Image (tube, rainbow, N blue to C red):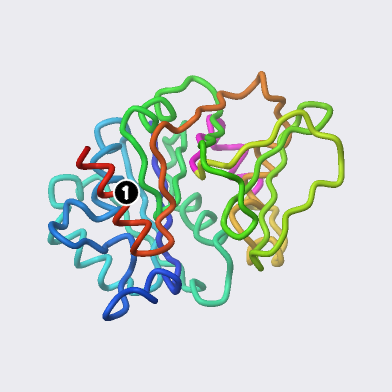
Amino acid sequence: MKSLIITVAGMSSRFNRDTKEDVLKCLYYEDVPANSLLSLQVHKTSHLVDEIIVVGGYRYEDLEAFVHRHLTDVSKNMKLVYNDHYQDYGSGYSLLKGIEALSPQTDEVVFIEGDLFFDTESIEKIITSKKDVISVNHEPILSNKAVALYFDANDYPHYIYDTSHSCLEIHEPFTAIYNSGQMWKFSNPSSVREICRHLTPTQEQGTNLEIIQQYFGVYKSQELDIISICLWFNCNTVADYREAIKALSK
């Protein structure tokens, strides 16, 4: 059984600087609801997975209403999960809640962040891969927005991200460095569940990289499927969203 986790609990603070009223950015659209990020993500993946778990928090009632009104064609396979710490914990708690909500029969888990726009072919490669998947993209690695992924001298992966959006640092030799595509596939759900059971309170309150690093950090690159996303936008702002929708129309 394949399960997809999408996390959308965040406060959308950067996105809402450009809107007339506060919104949950995964639900934002300017023409039709089908062009919201959530609708695009769900409809690009629903035929490839058995369940979709969406973890919300901020404006959770809006999320429920949108799914009920605009995603009726796929809602029977969707679970909505509430993150009651969306204001005071980091993104890792949403991933933790999503993992806790997995069906017992799940044997493959795909995780994508809810503010991403991506092409259909790339997400299909991630979901159908026979291996654990790390995704990368072709964007410049900028310290104020990127999650960087590098492989050390022994070929093990490491993720780095600066929550203050200042500078990134690598304090060891490395063989490769990428901009993370922020989508992953866990082919061993029992392992990721075990990691979640042993998180410290501090780790539970951190970013989703706490879980991701522990899971993928034991694999060398040749044991993983490293998939490069062809078309990728991280929609932190309305301008980012508009660029993504423009790409959709080409």
Look at 40% across and 54% down and name the residue there.
Answer: 114
Where in the figure is residue 90, as x and y percent of width and height?
Answer: 58, 66
**Left or right of residue 122: residue 32:** left
Residue nearer the viewer, 63 or 34: 34
- Image quarter of residue 249: top left
Look at 41% across and 41% down and name the residue there.
Answer: 232
**Left or right of residue 72: residue 151:** right
Q: Range of the magenta residues?
A: 183-195
Instruction: Classify the position of the N terminus by image quarter.
Output: top left
Amino acid type, mark 1: Ala
- The residue beneath circle 1 is 244
Instruction: Classify the position of the C terminus by image quarter.
Output: top left
Residue 12 belongs to magenta span: no
Where in the figure is residue 196, as x and y percent of width and height?
Answer: 62, 51
Q: Residue furthest right?
A: 172
Looking at the picture, does residue 105 appear above or below residue 65?
above
Where in the figure is residue 22, as x and y percent of width and height?
Answer: 32, 78
Looking at the picture, does residue 210 appear above or below residue 177?
below
Residue nearer the viewer, 5 or 155: 155
- Image quarter of residue 27: bottom left
Q: SS at mark 1?
A: helix
Look at 30% across and 30% down and name the residue there.
Answer: 48
**Left or right of residue 212: residue 12:** left
